[in-house]
Image: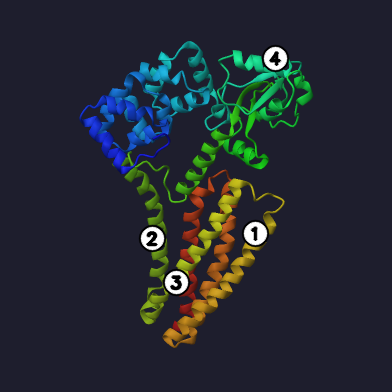
Amino acid sequence: MTGTAITVALLTQFNQWIEHRDYDALQKALSDLHSADIADLFIQLSAENRKLLADYMAPTFDAEILTYLDPSVKDQLVAILSPRDIAESVARLDSDDAIELVEDLNESAKEEIISYLPMASRQVVEEGLTFPEDSAGRLMQREFVAAPEFWTIEELFAYIRKDDTLPEDFYSVFIIDPSHKILGYIPISHLLKSHNKVILRDLIMPDVHKIRFDEDQEDVAYLFRHYNLISAPVVDDAERLIGVITVDDIVDVIDEEAEEDFLSAVGMGSVDFHANTFLTAFNRIRWLLLLLANTILSSIVINHFKGTINEAVILAVLMPIVTSMGGNAGIQVVTVTVRAIATRDIRPNNVKKIILKELTIALINGLVFATIAGSLATLWFHNFLVGGILATAIGLNLLWAGLAGIMIPLILARLKIDPAVTAAPILTTTTDVLGFFLFLGLATLLMVH
């Protein structure tokens, strides 16, 4: 059963065991499950059975399970379990996992659990929480393998076997001087392939990518992607080694940042199906109010040209084509631009080239769809003037969508405003308003007057 996802059949079985208090079956089944699968089980259980299972597991509860849970379910379990039991389990986690778990708790639970931690673990967690949020200091693992350059491989391996405070998994050994400054690193594979009597100094790779403790996690993720790193050392202001970040932590960061950008684009901070319904509704209402303002603005423009629409009713049929084409084309460019900003594919030395390219694409799209839409409108209404007005409005709106789609995110990023959150609604507002204004304005000039 190891590594098995919680299927419907397995969930049904667990519900039966919990309701019938079949602890022997529960114990056997849980012992075969990974912590991530147990977390998945907790998420899928009803609130009542979730509490019963948590009560049963309390004496031996593994805090690693909490690291895989949705925030609301995690809060429920923390409220059920004893702070002392949680603290005892947190103390057995790697330092980075312990800090990540504790930092997400509400203040009262955080303080209570920290107070029950053993002194050594408490100092590590409290120190970790002093680092800026979303920084390398919060991500790093305090357990690492470091050695002086004059050791032999044999001495290093003896040290690794003897010291039980070292991490269970590591990819490199960092070579340090007496002041704990990094001289370089040695991959584990190089150590395993070398003779025991070889001195570490002879294997050092000096091109180590050091990360400052206060560096933003997005910048750290970029560094790992750019250099294909598996691990990297973290240093303090004095360039002394204080921790290490591994690729598994960066995978979490990349997932988190991608999810954040994706959800921000539609006005949502997070997806938690177990969170409070009214709080979730409130968070979505704020975004919808912004969209309501957009539609009101568009309605004001339409109202300004109501006389034109009354005299040429066919315009009402074609109006949505202009705005939807502009909005959809603009969203394409915004999405590509926001992603390029996040991955740093857009740089000062290539920004002009990219803007010119997007304008060229917008011009091509404008000509293609202006021709298609204008021709269809002419054939549909047997009116060449209507087709020409529609073609002109679509062409100009698509050109604007291309320009605005790249410029709005760039300007927002320059102003230190997250373009993933605000670029799309600003873009669609401008394409809607401009689309209606162009189409109805041209119709007023050429058809009514």
SS at circle 2: helix
Residue type marked 1 = Ile
Q: Answer yes or no: do the residues labelled 1 and 2 have beta carbons within 8 Å?
A: no
Tell me, for residue 155, which label it has, or none. 4
Determine the CA span between mark 4 and mark 2: 74 Å
Residue type marked 3 = Ile
Dot 1 corresponds to which residue? 355
Circle 4 crowding by C-alpha within 10 Å: few under 14, some 14–19, many from 20: some
Circle 1 crowding by C-alpha within 10 Å: few under 14, some 14–19, many from 20: some
In the image, taking residue 425 as reference, residue 333 lies left or right, namely right
Determine the CA span between mark 2 and mark 3: 18 Å
Report x, y in % for residue 107: 39, 24
Dot 2 corresponds to which residue? 296
Q: Residue furthest right?
A: 202
Q: Quadrant of residue 179?
A: top right
Can residue 12 be seen at all in this image of the molecule?
A: yes
Circle 2 or circle 3, nearest the eye: 3
Report x, y in % for residue 232: 64, 30
Compared to residue 387, the image places residue 277 above or below, namely: above
Tell me, for residue 321, which label it has, or none. 3
Query: What residue do we see at 49% from left, 55% from top?
Result: 424
Q: Earlier in the sequence, mark 2 or mark 3?
A: 2
